Amino acid sequence: MLNAKSLLDSLTGGLGQATGGQGAKGLTGKAKDTWNNQSALGKGAIAGGLLGVLLTRGGRRLLGTGVRVGGAALIGGLAYKAYEDWKAGKAAGAEGGPVSLPAPEGTEFLPADPVAADDLATRILQAMIAAAKADGHVTPDERARIDAQLPNLGLGAEATALIAAELDAPLDVGRVAALARTEREATELYAASLLVVDENAPAEKGYLAMLAARLGLDPALVDHLHAKAAQLA
């Protein structure tokens, strides 16, 4: 059975392990080394190497230095904080300094029910992989490396199939937007996408703009999400 929440946590947690605690900031060198030297670290780090291949040109804040929570909690906390501040009418970026993320367990952002949590995590993973492809850097060579490693990660048949299917799927912002069923879920899917791209790169910036529009997100809410993400760096 696919446990998408565990997969999401292991991918991002492995990324932190693969980069010596530097998170996405250390991707370019150390994640590649991990990818090529599996025996040095455990399965989580190898999975982090897989995510590293997808994020080598973006995602520098996915796990900022000092962030020690799983991927589901990080994304959920960021989306929850941005959403609540937006609802309260606060100005984006008003806090300044490092953002303190809440732990939104039991909310729509981080469901307590295992089935609901797994379902949401599955859709978050789909959105993240789509966003990682937005700059077109998953070349045939990189895809071949991923395909060669997927069977060795011990992720299970369903997880492996999910990752492969998303890598194969044409980049379709409308399909990603349709994964959101509520405004809160739309906020979280955008947050997940934002954390895996370089928002200043033209292709990825354009992708985020289209995604926000298709998700129907208020521009002020989008500003809150970007401000909170910037505070993770």
Image: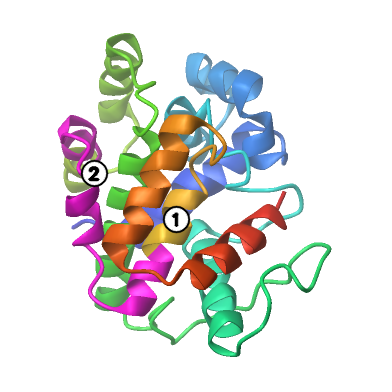
Q: Is residue 171 magenta?
A: yes
Task: Look at the numbered discs 2 and 1 and tell me whether their residues touch, using CB distance below 8 Å.
Answer: no
Q: Is residue 167 above or below residue 189?
A: above
Specify the principal SS of the magenta part.
helix
Residue matched to label 2:
156
Q: Work out whether residue 152 can be spotted.
A: yes
Mark 2 or mark 1, whichever is nearer to me:
1
Towards the viewer: 204 or 73: 204
> Magenta segment, which residues?
163-188
Q: Is residue 173 magenta?
A: yes
Classify mark 2: helix, strand or loop: loop
| Lower sequence index among marks 2 and 1 | 2
Q: Label 2: how many residues lie within 10 Å, few (<14), some (14-19) or many (20+)?
A: some
Q: Is residue 39 above or below residue 192?
A: above
Taking the spot 38% from the left edge, 80% from the top edge, the residue there is 111
Per the model, the C-alpha gap separating discs 2 and 1 is 23 Å
Towards the viewer: 6 or 96: 96
Taking the spot 56% from the left edge, 84% from the top edge, the residue there is 84
Callout 1, which amino acid? Ala
Classify mark 1: helix, strand or loop: helix
Q: Is residue 169 above or below residue 96?
A: above
Q: Is residue 93 above or below residue 104?
A: above
As drawn, which residue projects farthest toward the top? 141
Taking the spot 26% from the left edge, 68% from the top edge, the residue there is 180
Say left or right for 192 vs 23.
left
As drawn, which residue projects farthest toward the right? 97
Tell me where residue 121 appears, x and y as whole percent. 33, 62
Residue matched to label 1:
192
Tell me where residue 2 appears, x and y as whole percent. 22, 56
Say left or right for 174 vs 36.
left
Tell me where residue 43 appears, x and y as whole percent. 46, 36
